[in-house]
Each structure stands twice: as C-alpha cells, then as structure tokens.
Amino acid sequence: MSVNLFDRLRQELRTIKKQFLQDNECLSEERLEEFLEKALEASNYGVSILNNASANWNWDFTSSLFFSSTVLSTTGYGHTAPLSDGGKAFCIVYSVLGIPFTLLFLTAVVQRIMIFSTRRPVMYVSTRWGLSKPLVAMVHATLLAILAASCFFLIPAAIFSSLEENWNFLESFYFCFISLSTIGLGDYVPGESFNQRFRQLYKVGITVYLLLGLVVMLVVLETFCELQQLKTLRKMFYLKKEKPQDHLAILEHDHLAFTSVSHRNNSTSLREDNTFVSVPELASPGGDDPMIG
C-alpha cells in the first residue's frame, strides 16, 4: 500500500512539473531542476521559501527550547538543525555534556517516582488484603500502562488532531508514539504551520508534554521490569555466577588433585632411587669362599 502511495505521489509531481513547463515555455527544465534542488536542500534545514512561511520561526526562544529538548531526550526530529560551524560545534559539546546528565537525572527521578507509584501501592494492597504480591504487581502494572496510554497517547492524539489542520487521529497517535519512543522520524512535527494560533505557548506545551511523557514511559517500563514473571524470564539469558560454595569446592578439588599428583611423584621417585641404589653385598675376604685359599 505504501509503495502504491509512493508511486502515485511521484506520478502526480511529474504531472504537475510537466504542466508547469508547458505553461512557462521560457523556463527550461534544467533551470527548474536547479531551483527545486536548492529549495529542497533549504527545506531539509527548516528553511522555507513560501510566502506564508516568511516569519523567523526556526530559532526564536520557543523553537530553540523545543530543539534543545529533542536533543537532550535523543528524539531528534531533524526538522531544525544548526547551519553555522559555530552552531554545529556548540551542538556537539552541548550533546556530549547534556545527554549523559539528562539520562542520570531521569534515572534518579524515575527511581524516586517508583517508590510512590509502584512499590508502596503494591506492598500496601498485598499486605492489607493478603493477596499474592506477584499478582498485585501484575494487575498494578496493567492498570498503570492503560492509564499512561490514555493520558499520553489517546488524549494527546485527540488534541493534536483538533489543533493541527492536516492531521487525523491516526497521524496524531503516530506522532505521539514516535516521539515518546524517542524514534523521532521528523515527518510530523506540530506547531509548524504558518497560521498556528498561540504558537509560542503551543511549543512550550509540546516541550513539557515530551519531557513528562518520557518520564512516564520510563516509569511504566521500570514497573514491568520489576515483575516476578519478567525477572524469571530474564534469568534465562543471564550467565550463571559461581556461588561461594562452588568456588570453595573447586579450590578443594584442585588442592586434592595437586596433593595426589605430588604424592604420586614422590612415590615414583622413591621407587627409582631404590632401583638404582640397591646393590648386592660382596663376600668378605675372610669368609669361607672356596675360591680363596
């Protein structure tokens, strides 16, 4: 289906291009190709030549804040990128320092949220009603996943589909999933239309949504990772560690083997010494030897 759509769009563009050249005979196809190449190259950097996109939206405060959040969260839509050498160098240094710090910060935040969102509720319910802790944890993780999907996928998708003129619900849900999974393809970015109302406030709201959604996704994943069923499944892929008793048994076995080899070597040496040292005694000259007169 996607291949047919791709072929249909390509055919439509070729038809429009052919019709444009027929209506403008003074323009050669080579000059048109050169112009389109420049326009597409500029569009890849977030620069548009359309009259309705003449406003300087690429690097105002809210757009820069949105760009910074996508860099630190490793989402990286790619719709806006630094053009100057200084901007590219600063982006490298900013990413090298900012991304590890952001990951450490998110890890610390998620571990503290887990205490109040997962561990204490599961312990309270299992203790209060005497239920199995693995069962309570499974039900809690399922309910938490449903709540997170509703608050950060379904409801935002409905909001985006109403605020973005060209987005339907599926495309809005697709944007939410691509963003919160940090894939960030960049084919759908909200707040980029020229007639967007309250654009700066809208961009700030999207930035807050992305950061909160990323934290919630990490909490849900950590909750599922603490399930006893998943821990048992993960143990199948772990390397078995040697227990202290096994280590002592190996050492004792090696010691006994070394001792037995040493005793065996000593016994062999003694037998060899006895073989070469023992010589029959000669008769004394004063004895009764008949050969001696």
Image (cartoon, rainbow, N blue to C red):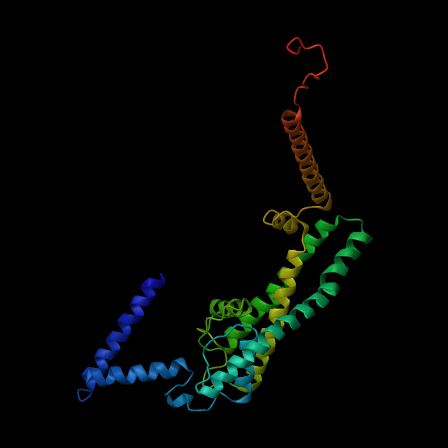
Quick one: 160 or 189, which is closer to the camera?
189
Q: Residue at x 62, y 65 (%)?
A: 218
Specify whether 130 is left or right of 161: right
Residue 182 percent location from the top left of the image: 53, 69
Q: Determine whether 17 is above or below 10 in the image.
A: below
Q: Residue at x 42, y 91 (%)?
A: 54
Specify whether 174 is left or right of 132: left
Residue sitting at the far top: 290
| Image quarter of residue 226 | bottom right
Specify whether 128 is left or right of 208: right
Residue sitting at the far front: 293
Quick one: 35 or 11, which is closer to the camera?
35
Q: Residue at x 54, y 66 (%)?
A: 181
Residue 33 percent location from the top left of the image: 25, 81
Name the quadrant of the C terminus.
Answer: top right
Q: Determine whether 264 is above or below 31 in the image.
A: above
**Number of marks in the rendered image:** 0
Q: Determine whether 160 is above or below 144 in the image.
A: below
| Image quarter of residue 225 | bottom right
Q: Residue at x 54, y 72 (%)?
A: 74
Quick one: 258 or 95, which is closer to the camera?
258
Question: Can residue 198 be seen by looking at this rendering?
Answer: no
Residue 184 percent location from the top left of the image: 49, 71
Name the quadrant of the N terminus.
Answer: bottom left
Residue 279 percent location from the top left of the image: 65, 22
Question: Can residue 279 be seen by looking at this rendering?
Answer: yes
